[in-house]
Amino acid sequence: MKTWFQKYHPDYLGTKGQRFYHIRKNTSWAKPISASRLWSLIPKETRYELLEKTEDVPVINCRDFGYHVVGDGKLSLDRPVVVKARGFTEGAKKEIESVGGKWIICP
């Protein structure tokens, strides 16, 4: 005859494997954002001010939003921009450099 615990909790003991109590999420994964949507990360008021001043180069920090940049599409404005992110694809690097901008990897 089984004990009460084995009768009502049959899967408690056995081959279920080790439990991870303090498991960490994958820290190298980040949400992707298209290069064509980079200007949407800047607030509208700031975006209008930057469009009036042609000598200023905006800095878009995708790391604050948790994104890495992928190269789908073209930048919505043909202005130089400095983009900081965790990661870039080759297409995104070429697209940012084609308008005269710079990309910076911030781990």
Image: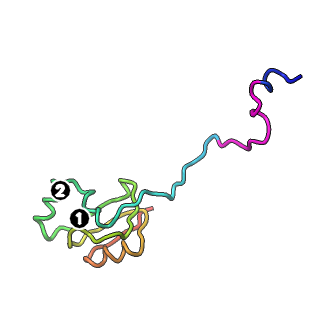
Looking at the image, residue 43 lies above or below residue 104: above
Q: Judging from the image, what secondary structure is the residue with disc 2 in?
A: helix
Query: Is 31 or 82 nearer to us in this picture?
Result: 31
Q: Count neighbours of disc 1 (C-alpha within 10 A) and say few if under 14, some if 14 to 19, many if 20 or more.
A: some
Identify the magenta region. 8-20
Q: Position of residue 71 (x, y in %)?
A: 36, 70
Quadrant hosting residue 94: bottom left
Q: Is residue 66 magenta?
A: no
In the rendered image, residue 12 lying in the magenta stretch gets the answer yes
Residue carrying label 1:
58
Marks 2 and 1, Cα distance to the nearest angstrom?
A: 9 Å
Circle number at residue 46: 2
Residue 90's x, y, as percent?
41, 75
* Image coordinates for residue 13, horizontal then vertical, percent: 78, 34
Residue at 42% over, 57% down:
31
Q: Left or right: where does residue 18 sit relative to residue 91?
A: right
Q: Quadrant of the N terminus?
A: top right
**At 10% from the left edge and 64% from the top edge, which residue is drawn?**
52
